[in-house]
Amino acid sequence: MEWQMRAIRGATTVAENTIEAMREAVIELLDELEQRNKIQPQDMISVTFSVTRDLDAIFPAAIARTRSGWDNVPMLDVQQMHVEGSLQRCVRFLIHVYLPVSTPIHHIYLRHASNLRPDWSLPQSLHTSQPAIESKV
């Protein structure tokens, strides 16, 4: 079976800037990511989380590291560039992962973040999503 490095995007919104609200939203987002894409932490290369400037109660990576197997995944938290009028209290991720070439990608957009990419609300095949990078691994 041929595998490739792939990128998966996702986002959600948080009800309020509290640890509890952020934990609930991030766990929901990551549960959906794992279930819909059938990925395992050992196949992940890296995860970048970004949050809007109105979220500073906890790092999303700190929440992710509490998940089984995620403590060995390299993760980075950054602040999303602020654009006036953009979606508030939003957590985004970009995950690089090795997947079989034939595996469709499901980008995960939940809650109010579903309005960010309505075109990605359906499964994305290798031929309609961003190009994959071939790996010799």
Image: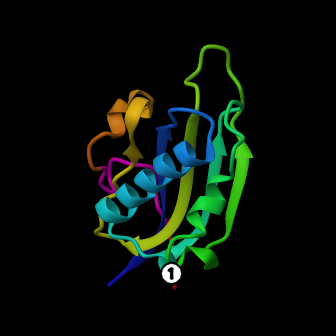
| Left or right, residue 100 beside residue 79 | left
Q: Quadrant of the N terminus?
A: bottom left
Q: Residues within 10 Å of mark 1 (few under 14, many from 20)?
A: few
Mark 1: secondary structure: helix
Q: Is residue 33 magenta?
A: no
Q: Residue at x 62, y 41 (%)?
A: 18
Residue at image coords 50%, 69%: 97
The residue pinned by badge 1 equals 42
Q: Position of residue 53 (x, y in %)?
A: 72, 32
Q: Is 13 drawn above or below residue 137 in the view shown?
A: above
Q: Which span of residues is magenta-colored?
A: 124-133
Estimate the x, y position of residue 66 in percent, counting from the top left.
57, 70
- The number of discs equals 1
Residue type, mark 1 in image? Gln
Q: Position of residue 11 (x, y in %)?
A: 48, 42
Is 135 located above or below residue 124 in the figure?
Answer: below
Along the line of sight, which residue is nearer the eye, 120 or 65? 65
